[in-house]
Image (cartoon, rainbow, N blue to C red):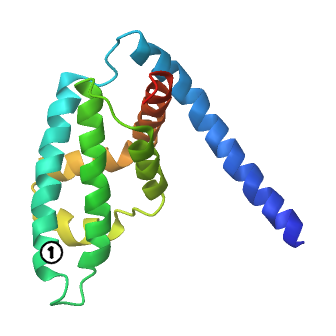
Amino acid sequence: MKSESAFVLYTNLGLRLYIRMSRAIPLAEKMLKGEHMISYTDFTRYQLLSSLFNKAKQRCVMMRNYTDVPYASAEEYIDFAIEECGILMKVYLSKQMSVDSLCAHIDRCDRASPDDYNAIFLPDYKEDVRQCVMNFENETEDRMDLVLAQILVAVSLGL
């Protein structure tokens, strides 16, 4: 039974990686041809979100030891989101990134949950900002495909 559950786990992980990589490979090929995968509108949205997350991080740092509200776990998601916005802005600007830093970001993906962040910060935002944050959260799979594509590009460039 123990071996069977391990087999199921590894099979599911392998399938998940295969599906993601099958979506990332065409994106990487386009990136290597010089096509932009992120629009200017998305770039400016990532700048706005990065600024928003940085302000939220400051609030988390000030409040995490003074209340029972889960600021520490919200801060973990904020750090992840700031890092991801930075990666996506670098993709737009065609900046080089190391494979190690991109892989470390992907490793953090499954641990970063927006639930505590949403509970603490979303009620304070205006409707348009709240919608922007929710759209960012809903596009997680597409962004991960893009980060995987960037890893393939970095590997092909020897970074």
Measured as percent of width and height from the top left, residue 74 is found at: 28, 70
Q: Is residue 6 above or below residue 106?
A: below
Q: Is residue 61 above or below residue 3?
A: below
Q: Is residue 32 above or below residue 73?
A: above
Task: Identify the residue at the far top of this view.
Answer: 33
* Secondary structure at numbered mark 1: helix
The residue singled out by tag 1 in the image is 61
Q: Is residue 142 above or below residue 114?
A: above
Measured as percent of width and height from the top left, residue 75 is found at: 25, 68
Measured as percent of width and height from the top left, residue 81 is found at: 28, 53
Q: Quadrant of the C terminus?
A: top left
Kind of residue at disc 1: Val
Give the residue drawn at x 55%, y 24%: 25
Give the residue drawn at x 15%, y 90%: 66
Q: Image check: 137 left or right of 1? A: left
Measured as percent of width and height from the top left, residue 29 is found at: 49, 16
Q: Residues within 10 Å of mark 1 (few under 14, many from 20)?
A: few
Tell me where residue 80 sits by quadrant.
bottom left
- Whether residue 127 appears in this view of the structure is no
- Whether residue 131 appears in this view of the structure is yes
Q: Quadrant of the N terminus?
A: bottom right
Give the residue drawn at x 44%, y 45%: 100
